[in-house]
Amino acid sequence: MRINDLLLGLVMALLGAVTIWASKDFPPLARQPYGAGTFPTIIGTFLVGLGLLLSLRGWQQRGALFIWQGQVTLSRTLTCLLAVIAAVAGYVLLTPLLGFPLVAPLMLALLIGWLSDGRWGMAVIVAIVASAVVWSVFALLLHVPLDLGILEEVIY
Amino acid sequence: MAELQAALGMVFAWDVLAVILGASLFGLLIGAIPGLTATMATALLVPVTFFMEPLPAISAIVAATAMAIVAGDIPGALLRIPGTPASAAYTEEAYLMGRQGKIGQALGVNLACSVVGGLIGVAILAFFAPLVADFALRFTSDEYFWLALLGLSCAVLVSGADPLKGAISMLIGLLIAMVGMDSVSGQIRFTFGISDLLSGISILPVLIGLFAVAELLRRMPEIGHTHFPPPPPVEKPFSGVGGLMWQYKAGIARSGVLGTLIGALPGAGADIASWISYALSRKLSRTPEKYGTGHPEGLVAASSANNAALSGAYIPALVFGIPGDTITAIIIGVLMMKGITPGPDVFTSSATLVNAIFIVFILANLLLLPLGLLAIRGARHILAVPSSVLYPLILLFCIVGAFAANNSLLDVWLMLGLGLLAYFLVENDFPIGPMILAVILGPVVESNFMRSMIKANGELLVLFERPIAAMLGGLALLVWLAIIVSSVRSAWQTRASATSA
């Protein structure tokens, strides 16, 4: 999804301005003109300057504000973006409740089944095997505390 | 001698060798699959290396990246689709050789030249890095400030066709690096009251978000819309390769050296080394008209250069802590997570580790031959792995990997947010390389500047008092002038073309 440089430049300049504003109260070091606010202010100033330059360039190009290009349709791309966001958000929100051993295979099976146009049998088998492998490597071998959720009560 | 023996002992331990073999196979898989890059292989490896000792951790990354770059040549030659950007310069040449019935020879040349190029790079790295480190021991915070700033500036300049977008990408990276407690003043910045952010944004979710999640978001919509034809069988790899390499020995040596030097430049990695070596080889060739018709000369030069560049990038990374490319930026991040700050002191305080890293480089490059041959033979099977299965698995690996460093679900959110940010930026031609370099170098620039200012009571001109600092400062300011002039000129040209249209 291509966004006109006019808009992108304005967003960058705004980000720079917010950074400068947020850095104004950082105190300098003792007997120094410099302190914790120096670098964020410099970064913000450059962002404002370069963002406005980008905007100017975009304005001179006079193109559309949004353009969709590429072989894949916009709806397909947006669906994939949403699927990834939903998968990550679902994992973060559900794992503390249901636990990795339930959430990970479910997430994988749904994604694989959807992306492979409904080969659900294969999706479920791959999801279970892959989740077991990831659990073995991270939880058992590397001792990463992957959440057990409600399974904690069942197991212990 | 005793140090070398100790280094050999460190490398030839069963766990390090097993890590090198496993990481090589992982790099082989990722590199051979079109669209998945060597940087992505590195980013995915980092969560696992987090739990290793420094040497196996670095060994894993060195082996995986070298293998991924070589494996990236395979889909290029077989399907005309470069496996990694570093193979793109000579994909057409290798593919056309295949159409002439010389697919085995094309892949054999790729593999053998990669090994030789890689070894040239290691030789230069092992010879020059300690010398430069010895010289750099005299550096103070003044020189380090300018050196880090110069690294950032060069990364912007060579990052792509549009230095303005490269500079903005770098500024966003610097902004990410500002989050957390300032190391000099102790001031808390941009944490929005989230205590998990006090120590800053962890490097792991940044790496995984920028290089793995963003790439997944770009590739996932293509599933079902891109179909690879079945690759042709590869027969007699290495047939006639020795003769070709002897014929173009000067080109291999030149590209090996050139690739190493380009790799050592901040921001310029294996892909740029490959393109420049190919172009130079064509310029110096007696038969430039044969380029682009399935001629091996350019293939020989570029595939030597890209593996040499991998080693070259480690020179500034190990000596100064200034990454030469995105992969060494990741390496520096890994070393810092393990409490080792790369710099000239490492060559004296951890000389055995440095020697062991050089030996790992040699070993990883030699391993390319048998494993590369295995990859060529098994290319059909690797290319048959369906993306619809692979991408969700990579996503799960990303989530667990981002969580693993701090056992924090906030890191998973950060990974997602940064992945989305990188996706939109790349879609709009903002390069990501300067951003990751800025995340690593931002604190280096700031802390050295503040140290210099504390020493000099806030007198800015002190930064130019020492001769080397003055030279580095002058260079950095010149590079910034070039970036600003180029940005203003591009805006001016856009205006002129819009007016004439």
Image: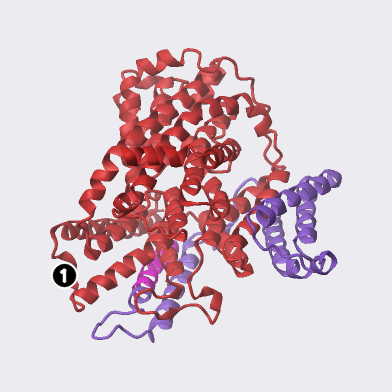
Chain colours: A purple, B red
Which secondary structure is most common in the magenta stretch?
helix
Task: List x then y, in percent, for residue B186.
Answer: 39, 79
Residue B280 visible in rendering? no
Task: List x then y, in percent, for residue A28.
Answer: 31, 84
What is the magenta range?
A42-59
Q: Callout 1 environment at 10 Å: few (<14), some (14 to 19), or many (20+)?
A: some
Residue, x 32% and y 77% (percent of image)?
A38
Residue, x 38% and y 84% (percent of image)?
A26
Quadrant in the rendering for residue B188: bottom left
Task: List x then y, in percent, for residue A99.
Answer: 77, 64
Whether B497 is drawn above or below B447: the answer is above
Q: Amino acid at mark 1?
A: Val
Residue A155 visible in rendering? yes
Residue, x 32% and y 80% (percent of image)?
A35
A46 within the magenta span: yes
Quadrant in the rendering for residue B488: bottom left
User: Which of the image's four quarters has the N terminus of chain B?
Assistant: top left
Labels in figure, total: 1
Please give the residue where the numbered disc 1 appears in the rendered image. B462
In the picture provided, is B48 more to the left or to the right than B220? left
